[in-house]
Image: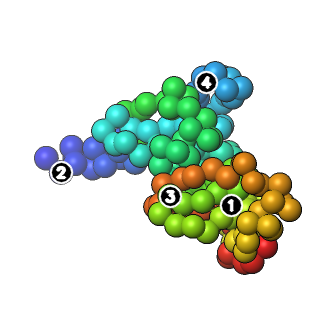
């Protein structure tokens, strides 16, 4: 009986060590080797993960972000997730102007990177400043629970 338990433990460990399967998508990722860029989720879980570098992945925050990063048709549904590298938390939002649907503040997101020293996020102080920065008709409204700071430095005034 104990021998079966040990073999099961070894088998489950070996299964965890296998990298994510490659994905084909229509947005230019094409057929890539395991661990390459792609969107994945397990059959039994609605959480979508984005393998954005060979050794880094993040969790897509909500439907609005998924639509900005790609499309739900790009998500590869797998029996078991086998992502490579480090989970960097919630995915960063693409560059642009944003306002949460439960607040009035408008933010400018610039640059790229995940982590404390990633891209910049700043809060726009006035409608005039928004106009000067060219964001007047380009503000994207996102769900109130969106973490716009994910992967970026702390919010500062623009």
- Point 73% across, 66% down: residue: 127
- Which residue is denoted by mark 2 in the rendering? 2
Q: Earlier in the sequence, mark 4 or mark 1?
A: 4
Task: Where is residue 68? Give x, y as percent.
Answer: 62, 41
Nearer to me, 107 or 152: 107
Q: Are marks 2 and 3 in contact (CB under 8 Å)?
A: no
41 is higher (above) or lower (below) than 149: above
- Which residue is denoted by mark 1 in the rendering? 114
Front disc: 2 or 1: 1
- Point 30% across, 38% down: residue: 44
- Specify whether residue 65 is in view: yes
Could you give the CA–CA distance between mark 4 and mark 2, rounded to whole angstroms?
44 Å
Q: Earlier in the sequence, mark 3 or mark 4?
A: 4
In this picture, residue 4 sits left or right of residue 32: left
Q: Earlier in the sequence, mark 3 or mark 1?
A: 3
Could you give the CA–CA distance between mark 3 and mark 1, rounded to whole angstroms?
24 Å
- Point 52% across, 49% down: residue: 60
């Amino acid at each position: 009986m104990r021998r079966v338990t040990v073999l099961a433990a070894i088998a489950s460990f070996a299964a965890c060590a296998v990298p994510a399967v490659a994905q084909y998508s229509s947005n230019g990722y094409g057929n890539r080797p395991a661990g390459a860029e792609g969107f994945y989720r397990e059959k039994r879980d609605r959480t979508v993960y984005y393998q954005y570098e060979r050794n880094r992945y993040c969790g897509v925050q909500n439907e609005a972000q998924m639509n900005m990063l790609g499309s739900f048709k790009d998500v590869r549904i797998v029996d078991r997730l086998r992502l490579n590298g480090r989970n960097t938390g919630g995915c960063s939002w693409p560059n642009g102007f944003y306002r949460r649907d439960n607040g009035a503040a408008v933010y400018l997101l610039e640059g790229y990177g995940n982590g404390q020293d990633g891209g910049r996020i700043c809060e726009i102080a006035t409608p005039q400043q928004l106009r000067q920065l060219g964001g007047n008709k380009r503000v994207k409204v996102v769900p109130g629970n969106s973490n716009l700071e994910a992967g970026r430095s702390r919010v500062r005034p623009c």
